[in-house]
Structures are given as structure tokens and as C-alpha cells.
Image (cartoon, rainbow, N blue to C red):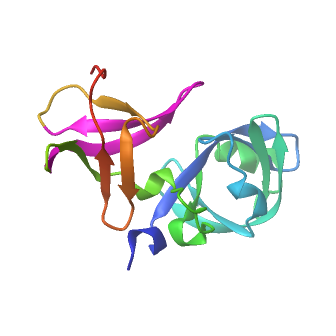
Amino acid sequence: MSKAKDDRFVPLAEVMRPHGVRGELRLKVFNAESDLLLDQAEVFVREKDGAEHEVSVDKARRADAAILLKLHSVDDRDRAEELRGAIIGLRRSQFPPAEEGAFYACDIEGAKVVVREGDGVREIGSVRSLTSYPSVDVLVVHAADGGKDWEIPLVEGYVAGVDVDAGVVTLHTLDDLER
């Protein structure tokens, strides 16, 4: 099965606190621009003790950078409070297809990162995560040599290509990058 079609749990938000008295939850969304949780009939809830449950969604709506989520089985503030700190996510197979030329950050976590050198490539590490700064998204790359992580701007000047199926990110250069 392709990594992009697997059934792994992908964390999308954390329950910050109850909202109101009828069990609504205020979520901190890890990717503030994502609306993925707004259109789901069911989500996975991973509680602080590690217990994981699939739960029906009654409704979801935006509230500035947060999402307010009402789960079917959470009907009062006390139960909502018990979920503080829980992680809300989906199975990767629930994601819609990525747009042409785009990918989901979860699909490249762990991918090998190589840089072109002459006629070949040299492995520099593996993708640890994707971090968004106000001006640019960067790949955080765990250095193969055990040194400090690389932060590679996710722009054409550095990134030559991302092959999700092969699990490889190819870079043009490391010039002008510090770690």
C-alpha cells in the first residue's frame, strides 16, 4: 500500500479547552490554514492516556485560528474538560487527494533528503517535520552526520523535487544555509 493511502493516525489538532456548556471543544489546529476537520463525519480522538476512539462529529466551525468541534458523545462541559489535551486526527486515508504538485507534510516525514552533487547525489538526512514561519515553510531535516538539524526553505531555489511514493526529497544545493 502506498504511504499516501495508508491508515496511520495523523494528528491535526489539540483540544485546548471546553467552549460553552454543551460539550463543544476549542481546538488548536496544527496547520492553522487547514479546513480538513470542518468537513468530517468522524474523527479519531487520542486521549492523554493513549486511548483512541473514533467519534462522530455533530458540527465543526471556525473561530478565528481555532476550530470549535462538537462530538456526538460529548454533551456537557465536564466531559469536554476531560478531553483537554487530547489529540484530534484522521486516518491518512481520509485525506482528499493532494493538488497537482502538492503534498501533505505527513507524507514526507521520514523521507530521505539528498542534495545533487555533480552527476550524483549525497544523502544529508531525513525529514523530521515541516515548520511554517511567517515568510516561508521549511523542512526540518535530521542530519545524517548527527549534527544540528538543517532548516531547508521549501522553495524552488533549494528543493528540486519531492517524490512522495519513493520517500525522497531532492535538493539543488545547500549553499547559504546554516545549521
Q: Is residue 135 magenta?
A: yes
In the rendered view, does 169 fall on the left or right side of 19? left
- Residue toward you, 53 or 94: 94
Q: Is residue 161 magenta?
A: no
Q: Is residue 111 above or below residue 26?
A: below
Quadrant location, the C terminus? top left
Q: Residue 147 placed where, x, y %? A: 16, 27
Q: Residue 16 placed where, x, y %? A: 67, 37
Q: Is residue 149 above or below residue 29?
A: above
Q: Quadrant of residue 129?
A: top left
Q: Is residue 43 above or below residue 46?
A: below
Quadrant location, the N terminus? bottom left
In the rendered view, does 142 fall on the left or right side of 42? left
Q: Quadrant of residue 67?
A: top right
The residue positioned farthest toward the front in the image shown: 119
Magenta stretch: helix, strand or loop mostly: strand
- Which residues make up the magenta segment? 120-144
In the rendered view, does 80 fall on the left or right side of 170? right
Please name the residue shown 75% across and 35% down the image: 65
Please name the residue shown 81% across and 34% down the image: 64
Q: Residue 33 placed where, x, y %? A: 69, 42
- Residue toward you, 60 or 53: 60
- Residue toward you, 124 or 88: 124
Can the viewer see residue 1? yes
Please name the residue shown 60% across and 70% down the image: 94
